[in-house]
Image: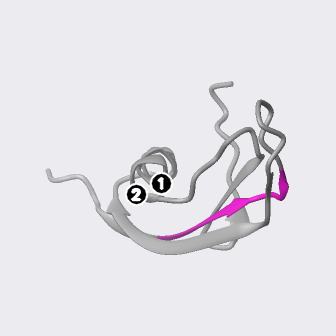
């Protein structure tokens, strides 16, 4: 039996903040995209590969289908 593939809407948000080394300030930024995969965890992991927002010490928040996702492994 084939695994069920679902399309997830992912939104990645970079919170505003300073880069730790240079002190350069980065504004809030966000990116939305869809991923086709078999689970929420897989969608979360793929979001790290697909997202092209630079994170330099700023907080990253990931929303999947409108709800903030937290990786329960950590």
Residue 7 placement: quadrant: bottom left
Seen as rendered, the residue at the extreme left is 1
Magenta stretch bounds: 9-17
Residue drawn at (69%, 24%) of the image? 74
Is residue 45 or residue 50 the one in the foreground? 50
* Label 1 – label 2 distance at C-alpha: 5 Å
Which residue is at a point 48% across and 58% down the rendered structure image?
A: 51
Q: Is residue 43 left or right of residue 21?
A: left
**Above or below — where is 27 with respect to 72?**
below
Vertical relation: 7 (above or below) 21: below
Q: Is residue 11 left or right of residue 24?
A: left
Camera-side residue of 73 and 33:
33
Nearer to the camera, 52 or 4: 52
CB under 8 Å between discs 1 and 2:
yes
Name the residue tied to disc 1: 47
Q: Quadrant of residue 20?
A: top right
In magenta segment, residue 25: no
| Element class at badge 2 | helix
Badge 2 is on which residue? 50
Percent x, y of residue 60: 71, 50
In the figure, 74 relative to 12: above or below? above
């Amino acid at each position: 039996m084939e695994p069920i593939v679902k399309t997830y809407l992912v939104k990645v948000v970079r919170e505003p903040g300073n880069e730790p080394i240079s002190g350069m300030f980065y504004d809030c930024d966000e990116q939305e995209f869809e991923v086709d995969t078999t689970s929420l965890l897989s969608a979360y992991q793929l979001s790290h590969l697909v997202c092209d927002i630079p994170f330099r010490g700023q907080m990253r928040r990931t929303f999947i289908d409108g709800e903030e996702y937290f990786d329960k492994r950590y």
